[in-house]
Image (cartoon, rainbow, N blue to C red):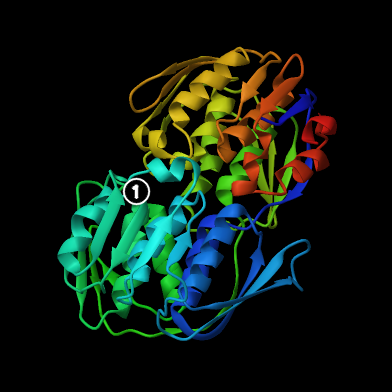
Amino acid sequence: MPSLRIESRKLSGRIFIQPSKSMAHRLILCALLARGTSVIDNIVLSDDIRATLGACQALGAGVSIEDSPRFANRKRILLSAPGEIRLSRPEIDCMESGTTARFIIPVSRLCADPVTLTGRGRLVKRPFDVYKSILPGKGVGFEDENGRMPIRLSGRLNPGEYELRGDVSSQFISGLLMALPFLEGDSTIRITGPLESRPYVEMTLDALHQFGISVEHSEDYRLFRIRGGQKAEARSLAVEGDWSQAAFFCVLGAISGEVAIDGLSKASLQGDRVILDFVRAMGADTRWEQDTLLVRPGTLKGIEVDASQCPDLVPAVAVAAALCEGKSLIGNARRLRLKESDRLSAVCSEINKIGGHVEEMEDGLVINGVGRFRGATVDGWNDHRIVMSLAIASSCCDGPMEINGYEAVSKSYPEFWDDFRSLGGRFDEQHMG
C-alpha cells in the first residue's frame, strides 16, 4: 500500500475551498432529468463525481467536460438530456460512491429497462435494505447477492405512498424525491421517527427547486407531497463551496495557525456549516472578513457534539477534540459504521496511535484531550475523510507521520495534497511514487 511521510510543522495560509460534492451530485442528476443542455460550473472531478457522470451517460445523457471559464483549476459540465430516462447500457458502475448508487436506483426506474448496478470497495457491503423492502411493492424488481451488490433492477417505479424511517441514510429519501415528481401520478413520502441528516434533504429540495421542480413538505420534514407529471427545465448553475471539506481547514486553523477560507456561502443549506459553531465552542477565534472565513487558534476546551445531522464532520471534529482540555463527547453517530470505513473504529484506532485518548462507544466517541500528538505510522482505512483528518493532525505531532493509503482522498478531494502543500505542508514525495 502506498504511503506518505508528512513532516510535522505548523500550517497556515489561505485556501479556496472545493465545491460541494453533495450539491454537485444533486445538480448533475437534476440536469439528467431536465430536457435540454444544462451547464454545471465549479466542478472537481473526484472519483464520486465521475461515478455520477458515468451513471448519467448510462441513463441517456451526453456529457461534455471543459475547463471552467470562471473558476481556476475547476471544470464545467455540459450535460445534454432527452427529458426522459433512456438506458444506453445495461450496467452502471457506481465505483465507491454510495450517493451515486442510492440516487440512481430510483432514478433509473423512470424507465422499465433492466439494469445492473455494481460497485467497489466498501460500497459492495453498504446497505440498500430500504429500497429492497419498498421498491418491489412499487413495480420494481430488486435482486442482489445476499444483501450486497451487484443489484439488478427491472420495471418502472409506480407513484403512491412511501414510508421510510428517519434514522436511515437521508440518501434514500433524496433518491425518491428526485424520481417521484416525474411519475404520472402523485406521491407522498412519510418519515417515521426523527429525520437525521435533514440538511441533506433540504439540499435535495433546493436543487430540485432550481430546476423548476416543486415538492411540498410539512414543517418538521416528516411528510412530503410530490405532484406527479412535472417537467424539469435545463439550467446554468455553479456549485457552491463545500462546508464538509472546509471542516478540515477550520480544525487546522483551530489547532495550528490562522487559515483563511474563500468560497464558502454564509447562507448555505449544508448542515456541515455547523463546524464553525463547533470550533467556536471549543475556543477557536473565528470571524468573517467580507466573504472570507478566518479561523485561528485559541485555548481549546472539550465540548459535546450531536452528530445526527452532521456525521461527516466527526473525523475532523475528533482531531480537534483530542487536543482540547478536558473531555469531549460525540454521540448519535452510529451510522458512521456504514460509511467508506467504520469511521468510529477508524477514528479511535488512528488517533490513539498518535497518542490520543479516544474510547469507542456503540454510537459515538469519548475523547480525553492531550497536549500534543506523537509521530507514528497510521492507516487511512481507504477512507478519504480519515486520511484528511490525519493529515491535519500531523501539524500537531512531535514527529513525522506516515499515512498508509493516502491516495484515498481522490474519492472526494483529488487536489487535497496540493492544497495541503500550499498551507506549508511538507511530505516525502518519494513515497508517492
Place of residue 48 in the rendered image (x, y in percent of width and height, measured from the top left): 55, 54
Please tell me which residue is depicted at 39% across the width and 33% down the height of the picture: 337
Q: Is residue 62 visible?
A: yes
| Vertical relation: 165 (above or below) 400 | below
Left or right position of 8 against 234? right
Place of residue 156 in the rendered image (x, y in percent of width and height, measured from the top left): 26, 74
Place of residue 148 in the rendered image (x, y in percent of width and height, measured from the top left): 34, 45
Element on which disc 1 rests: loop
Q: In terms of image quadrants, where is residue 263?
A: bottom right
Q: Could you say which is closer to the camera, residue 426 or residue 97?
A: 97
Neighbourhood count class around disc 1 (C-alpha, 10 Å): few under 14, some 14–19, many 20 upward: many
Q: Quadrant of the C terminus?
A: top right
Q: Could you say which is closer to the camera, residue 125 or residue 322?
A: 125
Please tell me which residue is depicted at 23% across the width and 71% down the height of the picture: 225
Q: In terms of image quadrants, where is residue 401?
A: top right
| Vertical relation: 389 (above or below) 142 | above
Q: Quadrant of the N terminus?
A: top right
Please tell me which residue is depicted at 34% across the width and 28% down the height of the picture: 363
Write down the residue under mark 1: 169
Please tell me which residue is depicted at 52% across the width and 40% down the height of the picture: 277
